[in-house]
Image (cartoon, rainbow, N blue to C red):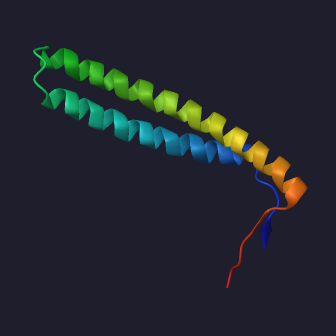
Amino acid sequence: MEIRSIDVVSAAKVLGTTYAIIGAIIGILSTIGALASDTGVGEGTLAAGGVVAIIILIIVYAIAGFVAGVLTAVFYNIVASIVGGIRINTR
């Protein structure tokens, strides 16, 4: 079996979703780290900023993942048409 081409939109959706999940994890960990540190800033302000940071990270990572998925699939399809696709053995 050989993967000759990758659907661009499918790859973009998968990578966009994957990157959004990574962004959420990083945002949550960053917020927990900020709340655990002694910054002298009011906890309510820091928590609200953390929620905004998580939302922004999710959006930015999702967009970056979607674009990366498009570029990866397009380049793969070009290269696979020239040199052949990836061969997979299924036994």
Q: Position of residue 40 (x, y in %)?
A: 10, 15
Q: Residue furthest right?
A: 82
Location of the C terminus (image quadrant): bottom right
Q: Position of residue 22 (x, y in %)?
A: 43, 42
> Can you say whether 3 is above or below 52 in the image?
below
Rendered image quadrant of residue 89: bottom right
Q: Toward the viewer: 44 or 72? A: 72
Q: Toward the viewer: 81 or 46? A: 81
Q: Residue at x 69, y 48 (%)?
A: 10
Rendered image quadrant of residue 3: bottom right
Q: Residue furthest bottom?
A: 91
Q: Residue at x 34, y 33 (%)?
A: 27
Task: Please tell me how many numbered marks the rendered image carries.
Answer: 0
Q: Residue at x 26, y 30 (%)?
A: 31
Q: Position of residue 66 (x, y in %)?
A: 62, 37
Q: Residue at x 78, y 74 (%)?
A: 1
> Can you say whether 42 is above or below 71 in the image?
above
Question: Is 27 placed left or right of 20 in the picture?
Answer: left
Rendered image quadrant of residue 70: top right
> Can you say whether 85 is above or below 40 in the image?
below
Question: Is 18 placed left or right of 52 in the picture?
Answer: right
Question: Is 27 placed left or right of 15 in the picture?
Answer: left
Q: Position of residue 7 (x, y in %)?
A: 76, 50
Q: Residue furthest front?
A: 83
